[in-house]
Amino acid sequence: MAEKVWFITGTSRGFGREWAVAALDRGDRVAATARDTGSLSDLVERYGDAILPLALDVTDKAAVEQAVRQAQERFGRIDVAINNAGYGHFGFVEEVSEEELRAQLETNLFGAVWVTQAVLPGMRERGSGHIIQVSSIGGISAFPIVGAYHASKWALEGISQSLAQEVAPFGVKVTLIEPGGFATDWAGPSAKRSAELPAYADVRQQVMEQRSQRNAEPGDPAATRGPILELVDAAEPPLRVFFGRSPLGIAKADYAKRIETWEQWQPLSERAQG
C-alpha cells in the first residue's frame, strides 16, 4: 500500500488523535491540526518529521486555507482529509441562543466546508483523494436536548451527499462516518451548554436518564484505528458508514417509522400534486 498523506482536524484528543496515530504507526504522514499544538508535542517527539502540527481554528476560513497550503508545501499533497473538529451543544431548542446556534454551525458545518474547499483543488488536479466527514448517528436521526448539534450534522450530511456526486467524476471519494456513543469527551469538557429554563426541568431529567441508558456501553475510540485504515484503503469506500454497534438499530427503527408514515399519508401527498 502506497504511503498516504493525511490532513486531520481536531487531533488533540478522541477520534482525531487515534486516527493520526494509526496513520503514523504504519508509516503515513500527517498534518495534524488542533487549537493548541502543545497537545501534539508527544506525537512530534515520537514520529518526528512524519507529523506536521498546525494550530488551527476551523471557523477561520483564511487560517484553514493557510494550514492546507502549509501541509501541501511540506508533504507535496493531501490524499486523505478528515474533518473531525467539532463539539456537542446541549440545550432544548427554546433554550439555545442565536450566538450558540451560530457557533455550533460555524464549527461543525462551516469548518468542515472550509477544509473541504481548500483541499479539493489539489485532489481534483491529481484525480484522486478521499474526504472524510465525521458526522454522527445524530446526522440521520435526532434526540431531544441536542437539536443544535443535529442541525449541524444533518446539514453536513446533505452538503456531503451533493459533494460526493459532484467530485466523483474527478476520482475524489467522500465518506460520512456516523459514530454512535464513544468514550470521548464529546459530552464532557468539549461540550457547550445553554442556560436552562425551569419549565423543562422534568423533561430534562427524563431525557438525560434515557441518554444514559443509550450510552451505557460506549465504544473505545482506540478500536477505530483499524477500521479507519481499512476505510481509507478501500478502492470503493461507502458514502456512509456507521462506527459502533448501536447506530444500525437506531437507523432501522427510525427509517421504518418514516416509511410507515409516508405510506400512510401518501393519498394526501398525491392530492397535493394537483
Image (cartoon, grey):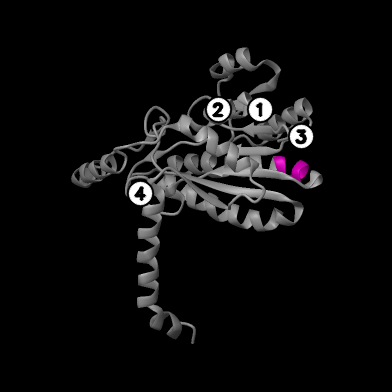
Nearer to us of marks 1 and 4 is 1
Amino acid at pointer 1: Val
Furthest residue to the left? 202
Q: Residue at x 59, y 40 (%)?
A: 230
Amino acid at pointer 2: Thr
Which residue is more in the foreground, 111 or 243? 243
- Asked whether the beta carbons under mark 2 and mark 1 sit within 8 Å of each other, the answer is yes
Residue picked out by circle 3: 77
Furthest residue to the right? 125
Nearer to us of marks 2 and 1 is 1
Amino acid at pointer 3: Arg
Which residue is more in the foreground, 58 or 31? 31
Residue picked out by circle 2: 11
Q: Secondary structure at mark 3?
A: loop
Tell me residue 201's x, y (percent): 20, 42
- CA gap, disc 4 to disc 3? 42 Å
Residue picked out by circle 4: 93
Which residue is more in the foreground, 187 or 196? 187
- CA gap, disc 1 to disc 3? 11 Å
Q: Earlier in the sequence, mark 1 or mark 4?
A: 1
Q: Earlier in the sequence, mark 4 or mark 2?
A: 2
Q: Earlier in the sequence, mark 1 or mark 3?
A: 1
Magenta stretch: includes residue 121: yes
Q: Secondary structure at mark 4?
A: loop
Nearer to us of marks 4 and 2 is 2
* The image quarter in which residue 29 lies: top right
Residue picked out by circle 1: 30
Q: Secondary structure at mark 2?
A: loop
Magenta stretch: includes residue 77: no
- CA gap, disc 3 to disc 2? 19 Å
